[in-house]
Image: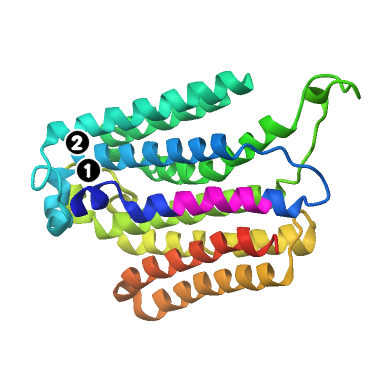
Amino acid sequence: MKYFLKLIRTKNLIIILMTMIGVAFYLIRSNYYQKVDFDLLDYVLLIFSTMIIAAAGNVINDYFDVKADRINKPEKVIISKFMKPRWAILLHWTFNLIAFLIAVYLSVKYHTLIFVFVHLVSINLLWFYSVQLKKKLIISNLIVAFLTGLVPLLCVWFFKVLNESAVPFSPYREETWSQNLDYSFVYFLAICAFILNFAREINKDIHDIQGDLVTHVESLPIKIGKEKAAYLTIALIQIPLILFILSYYVFELIQLNTPTMVLLLLSGAVNFTSAVLYILKKEATLTWINHLMKWSMFLGLICLFSNSL
């Protein structure tokens, strides 16, 4: 059981769980002045399907990554060591099938193809990423970052489907009543999640150069060198703070309370600290920078709960 939980990356799945709960909490609490349509059971199904797609992606990624992992992180190899490869494939397809059936149910119930479309895109991207695209320059990093940013957007689409109607309004037909919620803060966090995870993937590639060379992966650190890739990572993680300043102080696109402002500024300070550390200590701080990025993303996640208090 311990190795199964490691294989599906339980910590990452918990982050997905907390993100989706946080988005729902934020949208319901921040729109307290109007009735927000929300089906708890269907949202739980959406969360579950999203988590098992991610779990399936982790399994298939490890399946095709055994050779590189034996070099980069031999202590973390599970497939072929603690689980037979055929069981990994079976697990992958079982998870994806269950997730797809849930998407079909939600799409049929709410008369939309959005859930089937997003689930199919995610399943196929994770498959092609593991089989081939992971070896492609930049594309591999963009796919992981895109799928991470897609999670809060999927939650937004769920609320849009339940609350926004394209049918002409009629006071006598409840299905035509429409609520236009404010999703701007969720969009902001989704963009920040994309940027930070893109940077984090580049940082991880710096640590995996040895194994990537053996498996012929075209990673950015291999192409431009460790130092330039590290400076690119440092530059990217400063962008969320700039976006926060522009979105809140300059263009007033997002509404924030004081605790959330403090958390976002703290997140920006953590990322700025990463830049200072690298400039002072160079390569010796790359592992610390990876940990600091995790803390920065964690602070962003908490904002979903703090901004609705």
Is any part of residue 259 visible from this angle? yes
Mark 1 or mark 2, whichever is nearer to me: 2
Q: Quick one: 305 or 67, which is closer to the camera?
A: 305
Q: Which range is magenta?
A: 15-26
- For label 1, the residue is 62
Identify the element where label 1 is drawn. helix
Residue 247 is situated, as x and y percent measured from the top left of the image, at: 72, 57
Q: Quick one: 94 or 211, which is closer to the camera?
A: 94
Using the image, determine if residue 197 lies above or below residue 157. Answer: below
Q: Residue at x 52, y 52 (%)?
A: 19
The outermost residue toward the right is: 171
- For label 2, the residue is 88
Using the image, determine if residue 266 lies above or below residue 52. Answer: below
Q: Quick one: 199 or 39, which is closer to the camera?
A: 39
Residue 144 is situated, as x and y percent measured from the top left of the image, at: 41, 44
| Left or right for 130, reference 252 | left
Is any part of residue 225 visible from this angle? no
